[in-house]
Amino acid sequence: MDSIGSYLKKHTEALVKDIGIETACAITGKSKATLGRYYSTMPDHSERFIPVDTVATLEKQAKYPHVTAALAELNAITLSYDKLNHNVAPGRLNADVIKLAQRFAILMAEYNQATENGIITNNESKRLLQEAVALQQVLLDMKAHLQDETG
């Protein structure tokens, strides 16, 4: 499997796990086995990818648009949310800056822990990726809040 396929499968797995496999099955009408095949890296499933309509359905329920963001990153496209949080009051910049600092501190702590022995394991790499995605989400929220404040 090429690196793009592997990258998309990892983000498909993150999307399904963001919602939870049981919930993902319920809202898509697909079985655990079918959803699992979409992110399986086994040779038998290497050419099988999640349909776009299923991605859209799952990303409506997810905390973050994992597959859409992955596709954007692969094509050097920057995503922008239009009013991500409809109930957010103006003047949240200080709260956003605090969240940003906290997320960055968590990412750095994970990095320091992962590099203590000079080897970053697969699990440590996954944790670093999760923290980087969480940091990205905070930045996107902050951008949306700033756009709302500037009109």
Image (cartoon, rainbow, N blue to C red):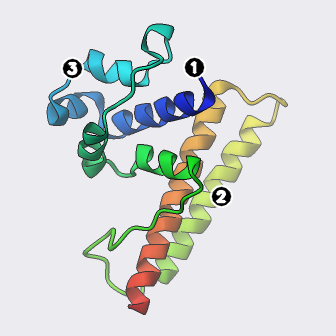
Q: Is residue 140 above or below residue 58?
A: below
Mark 3 or 2: the one toward you: 3
Residue name at image x 70 percent, y 26 percent = 121
Q: Mark 3 or mark 1, which is nearer the start of the sequence?
A: 1
Mark number, residue 24: none
**SS type, badge 1:** loop
The residue positioned farthest toward the top in the image shown: 44
Q: Are marks 1 and 3 in contact (CB under 8 Å)?
A: no
Seen in the image, is 129 located left or right of residue 29? right
Q: Amino acid at mark 2?
A: Ala
Residue name at image x 42 percent, y 49 percent = 68
Q: Residues within 10 Å of mark 3 (few under 14, many from 20)?
A: some
Say which of 89 and 36 sits in front: 36
Residue 115 appears in which quarter of the rendering?
top right
- Identify the residue under disc 3: 31
Q: Mark 2 or mark 3, which is nearer the start of the sequence?
A: 3
Distance of label 2 from label 1 (alpha carbons): 35 Å
Residue 116, can we see it? yes
Q: Quadrant of the N terminus?
A: top right
Mark number, residue 1: 1
